[in-house]
Image: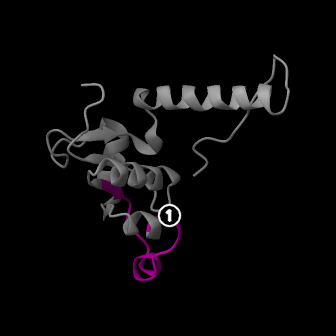
Amino acid sequence: GPGQVPRMLVSYGGAQSNAMLALALVAKAKGVPLTYFTKPIPRWLRETPSGNYAEALALGANITAVSSELYKSFEQTGCPTQLVPEGSLWIPQGGACALAEPGVQNLASEIKDWLRDVQEFEDPFCVVLPAGTG
């Protein structure tokens, strides 16, 4: 239910994904493991981890390379129940799900308050930002 901490966070995406790193930070803060599926990882990155991949590993993320076919199946059918333990929370690629909406609304509210209070902007104004740029 709401507010309940899942047994594990499970997601998928690119090996340098910003969402992966964000999930690794959330998992660490909540004290739950993160299992993250990605396409085959280049040898150079496996041998010399860098960027978001290295940071997520350092936070304890279990980053698992899967075949391109299995990866594509996540996009088509969603949660791979055979790979996700009961009680886990499946988060679609990039965190693109209804669970993200309250956080996005909070962020938008904070930006709106900042624009009004600090920058003295008046309504109407528009905030444009990239999303899913990977």
User: Which amino acid, mark 1?
Assistant: Asn
Find residue 119 and report its image quarter.
top right
The structure residue drawn at horizontal position 79% and vertical position 25%, both measured from the top left corner, is 116
Q: Which residue is mark 1?
A: 52
* Image location of residue 89, percent across then percent down: 27, 39
Q: Is residue 54 left or right of residue 36?
A: right
- Examine the rendered structure and indicate whether residue 46 appears above or below residue 124: below
Q: Which quadrant would residue 66 be assigned to in this image?
A: bottom left
Residue farthest toward the front in the current orientation of the protein = 117
Residue at the image point whose x is 29% and y is 25% from the top: 2
Q: Quadrant of the N terminus?
A: top left
> What are the residue bounds of the magenta stretch?
35-53
Counting from the top left corner in percent of width and height, residue 104 is at 55, 31
Q: Is residue 69 magenta?
A: no
- Looking at the image, residue 117 sits to the left or right of residue 73; the answer is right
Q: Is residue 90 above or below residue 49?
A: above
Depth check: give the residue in front, 7 or 69: 7
Residue 102 position in % (x across, y down): 48, 26
Q: Does residue 94 appear left or right of residue 34 in this picture? A: right
Image coordinates of residue 92 in percent, x first then y, are 38, 40
Identify which residue is drawn at 61% across, 41% down. Answer: 131
